[in-house]
Image (tube, rainbow, N blue to C red):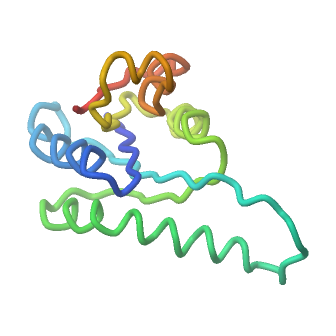
Amino acid sequence: MKILVAVDGSKPSLKAVQLLIHHCDWYREFPQVELVTVHLPVPRVAKLPKGQLERYYVEEGQAVLAPAKRKLDAAGVRYTAHVLVGPVAEAIVKHAKDKRCDLIYIGTRGMSELGKALVGSTATKVLHISDVPVLLVK
């Protein structure tokens, strides 16, 4: 089984990581984990030196991934970490499809039902556009 865990540095996303760790023994085989974070593209306002924007994405992404990596390392769960760039929900779903994931774990922010109806959320959008099953962690 291959599981994608999407993190953004928030407490709900780290709860998704913790839930995965807690449920690893539910699966017949220890799951392969794709740990991802997504950075929205930075508008290109001025010409930047070659590679500067890419370094920015990597540095920012690694900072977001660090707490989740520490949790997975402490639990002995092997993973592959990725920093993606693009529209968040679409990038998560595309990566899950490309890597042939069987499940997506994603945290929710616990917004009220009215707030979700008015604003929406990344987790809700992933749920609606994904063909891969999604586990929402509150």
Q: Is residue 92 left or right of residue 112?
A: right
Q: Is residue 67 left or right of residue 119?
A: left
**What residue lies at 49% left-to-right and 19% top-to-bottom?**
118
List x then y, in percent, for residue 95.
Answer: 56, 40
Q: How many marks?
A: 0
- Position of residue 86 relative to residue 125, above or below, is below
List x then y, in percent, for residue 33.
Answer: 34, 47
List x then y, in percent, for residue 93.
Answer: 54, 32
**What residue lies at 50% left-to-right and 35% top-to-bottom?**
96
Q: Is residue 105 left or right of residue 60?
A: left
- Position of residue 7 relative to residue 126, above or below, is below
Residue projecting furthest to the bottom: 49
- Position of residue 29 relative to residue 132, above or below, is below
Q: Quadrant of residue 44?
A: bottom right
Question: Quadrant location of the N terminus?
Answer: top left
**What residue lies at 26% left-to-right and 44% top-to-bottom?**
12
- Position of residue 8 relative to residue 73, above or below, is above
List x then y, in percent, for residue 71.
Answer: 19, 62
Question: Quadrant location of the C terminus?
Answer: top left
Q: Of residues 67 and 80, which is closer to you in this image?
A: 67
Residue projecting furthest to the right: 47
**What residue lies at 41% left-to-right and 64% top-to-bottom?**
64
Q: Quadrant of residue 89?
A: top right
